[in-house]
Amino acid sequence: PAPELALAIVVIAVVVAVIFFGHSERYYAASSPSMRSFYLAGRDLSVPAGACSLVATLTSSGMINSTAEVARTEGLIWALAPLMWTASIWAGGYLCAYEARRRKCVTALDLLQARVGARLGALHVVLYLFANTLWVAAILEAIGDTASVVLGRDRALCMALAACVACGYTMTGGMRAVVCTDVLQAAVMVVGLAVVVPFALSSPLARPWAREEGAPYLASFPEAVTRAPVAPPPGAGPGTSARTVNLLGPWLDRLVLALCAQPVEQVYFQRVLAARSPADARRMTAWATAGFALTAALCYGVAAAGAQADWALAGPAAARLCAPAGRTTGCVLAHMTPRPVALLGTAAVLVAMMSSVDSAVLACATLLVWNGLWRGAGWRAEADHVRRGLRGVGAGRDAVAHRLGAYLRLANRLTMALVAAVALCIAVPRVSVVQLHYLKVDLPLFLLLPPLACAAWSEGINAYGVVTSAVVCTALRLLSGEPSVGLPAAVRWPGFAPGLAQIGAGGGEPRVVTVPGAGPGEGLQLFPFRAALCALAFALILSVSEATNHAFFGGWLPRQWDVLGATRRPTARAWA
């Protein structure tokens, strides 16, 4: 049929584009400058292309689906990600982009490795791999749920095909292929969502916007946050008094998580570091902020349509299919829009997925090969040593360069394939896209943002401050518990509510329930402890670094005790 043919044409156009732009052998050889060309497109990225690429990458299918899921289950007030990400992009452009591009960094971790050393800085690659793998899993889960509902195909097959296409051209083309395809994908995504939103909001399934009972998506701030209702325990009598709880702390935690998500992301640094100049990097983020504000509004439009939909009007089968909140976006496309519009919206979600997965796997490969192997594991020093020994021997130098290039190409491609495979294994069992997004930014909030920000703006930080902050904050985070993975809370922050658990508000149900038979560590942390851990990380890095610098350079401690080499860094000598 014509609609299916239109979707096939869109997919074929994307595949043709990635094949056309995917030739990379002319850009990718063995030497370090060619590695930078593969990772950063030769630092020749224009402002319009970089802004479009940044918008396409950050507007992932995971964000579209997670916004719709949160709006349906917890209310629009809790769907903070699109709004806060817009502010995060703008803040990152003025706080990080200019400084990182001015120093000619290749990745975000270059700033940190210059302060604390190549090997200690390379340990942060593990955090990036963890976060990006969860992000790819969330994106694949979103595209699997949407495509399976709209197209009626197996969700695992949809996820596998999408991951293979996205990884295929990234393995061959690098950053140039990613950026060139992102421009096309951004156009398809914006047009598709812009067409879907008016049809969905005017659908007969959409309930009126007037305040009514059982419409939690329209709840006011006090009803949704500061006076959230608590469901009575099972077996409670009808005369049980109503109870409310203040969820301002968890709401602030979510706001901070969304606000601080982007400035530390390598997918963000990929674009700003590929700009032609530091000024272009700042202008790129400004234009990307405006573009992302548009896509964020479209995401909120899809979320509002899904939140106010009465799926029972679509029939019993549709009501059962759309009962899980994770299928909200797919159900909006399948039951609230005409078939051609639904397929166009599916194409928009598909290209949103591809534009994010390709950047995520490229970011993982860049960090592992450049920061982990090339700098952290000493491949760069070994290559320089061999080249110095073969100075003047042209054939030997060419042979070494060819072999090293083969190793680097293999390492890049294996990393991309491994990240995609692990993410696919996480996403095939049904998991919540929202939970994957929260876990993705949880640890980086206090393990990546504080050291990177301090490395960019403070001359005096050293390895002792970074290590102390990481150990203390990680221990406190684990002891604070995490209900989504079954980890009980050993540390009870102020306001800890034992026996309670936060859930969604779908169908007008209370947002907090009483857990029967809850253990001593099971409950709800009402204090914004994640934001507190982020502030504590900043304080520990600055204070411990200052104290150890004074101790070593002031003669209070012998420099032989400097096991982390803080006094041997050029930046430390300049500070002293």
Image: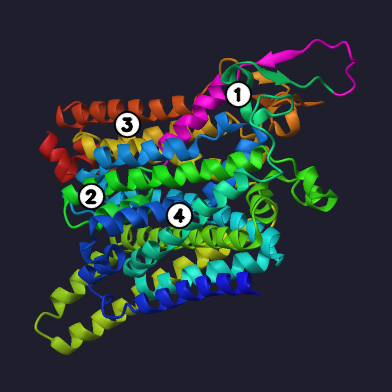
Helix, strand or loop at mark 1: loop
Instruction: Look at discs 2 and 1 and give the one toward the viewer.
Output: 2
Calculate the distance from the C-alpha at mark 4 to the C-alpha at mark 3. Answer: 42 Å
Q: Earlier in the sequence, mark 1 or mark 4?
A: 4
Q: Residue at x 54, y 62 (%)?
A: 350
Residue 458 position within the rendered picture, expressed as x and y whole percent measured from the top left: 21, 34
Helix, strand or loop at mark 2: helix
Mark 1 is surrounded, within 10 Å at the Cα level, by few (under 14), some (14 to 19) or many (20 or more) other residues, namely many
Q: Which mark is residue 281?
A: 2
Quarter of the figure with residue 379: bottom left
Calculate the distance from the C-alpha at mark 2 to the C-alpha at mark 4. Answer: 23 Å
Q: Is residue 399 above or below residue 353?
A: below
Q: Is residue 106 shown to the viewer in this render? A: no
* Magenta stretch contains residue 399: no
Helix, strand or loop at mark 4: helix
Q: Which mark is residue 190?
A: 4
| Amino acid tagged 4 | Val
Q: Which mark is residue 218?
A: none
Are the residues tagged 2 and 1 within 8 Å (C-beta)? no
